[in-house]
Image (cartoon, rainbow, N blue to C red):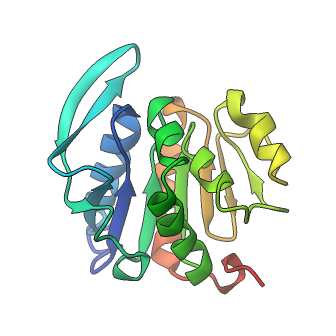
Amino acid sequence: MSTEELKGKKIAILATDGFEEVELTEPKKALEKAGAETFIVAPESGTIKAWDHTNWGDEYEVDVNLDEAKAEDFDNLLLPGGVLNPDQLRMNKKAIQFVTGFLHAGKPIAAICHGPQILIETKELDGRKMTSYPSIKTDLINAGVNWVDEEVVVDQGLTTSRNPDDIPAFNDKMIEEFREGVHEELAPN
């Protein structure tokens, strides 16, 4: 992987307290190694606290408050999982508007584990092929998704994976899709 592959790309990482630590830190490192500039976007200012498997993890600096964040200011979006993180974000109107902005613009999105829960709230997943942590399979199917149990799934710029074990494959496909840029077919008709 080249350190220039994503040079000039600005990546938003939408998260809040309770994100699965490795699902933010490992993709973030891979994106930065590929030359991207990453920004943690959160509903709160200051720091957000990670969840590390079964305990609270480290705190991470928020780069952009969600109140000031606009999809048009970023090239791509990363949605880490964790149980608490997406459950809180999917109830946040501004978070849903932010995510929907990426979909409407056809900008690639990568979501891992429980991260796709946020996408459900956009009501724009009908007909998409995706994967996720198994506990949200039924939620995604009810949202019109063709859910599959695979390490990584790419559907028109939308990259999804099941859990932290899938991170290496997730990172590779995420970078590939982010490098390709806007997917016109991602935007709703």
Q: Is residue 71 left or right of residue 137?
A: left
Instruction: Give residue 129's quadrant in the image.
Output: bottom right
Q: Front-most of 166 and 10? A: 10
From the image, which quarter does the C terminus lie in? bottom right
The extreme top residue here reads 54
Q: Front-most of 38 and 88? A: 88
Where is residue 146? Give x, y as percent: 85, 51
Q: Front-most of 82 and 37? A: 82
Q: Is residue 143 left or right of residue 131?
A: right
Residue 36 to residue 154: above or below:
below
Where is residue 160? Give x, y as percent: 61, 50
Q: Residue at x 32, y 53 (%)?
A: 43
Where is residue 168? Give x, y as percent: 47, 42
Q: Is residue 117 left or right of residue 98?
A: right
**How many numbered callouts?**
0
Q: Residue at x 64, y 32 (%)?
A: 133
On the question of residue 52 being in view, the answer is: yes
Residue 35 to residue 150: above or below:
below
From the image, which quarter does the N terminus lie in? bottom left
On the question of residue 1 being in view, the answer is: no
Instruction: Give residue 187's quadrant in the image.
Output: bottom right
Residue 87 to residue 57: above or below:
below
Q: Residue at x 50, y 41 (%)?
A: 86
Where is residue 175? Give x, y as percent: 45, 63
Q: Residue at x 80, y 42 (%)?
A: 148
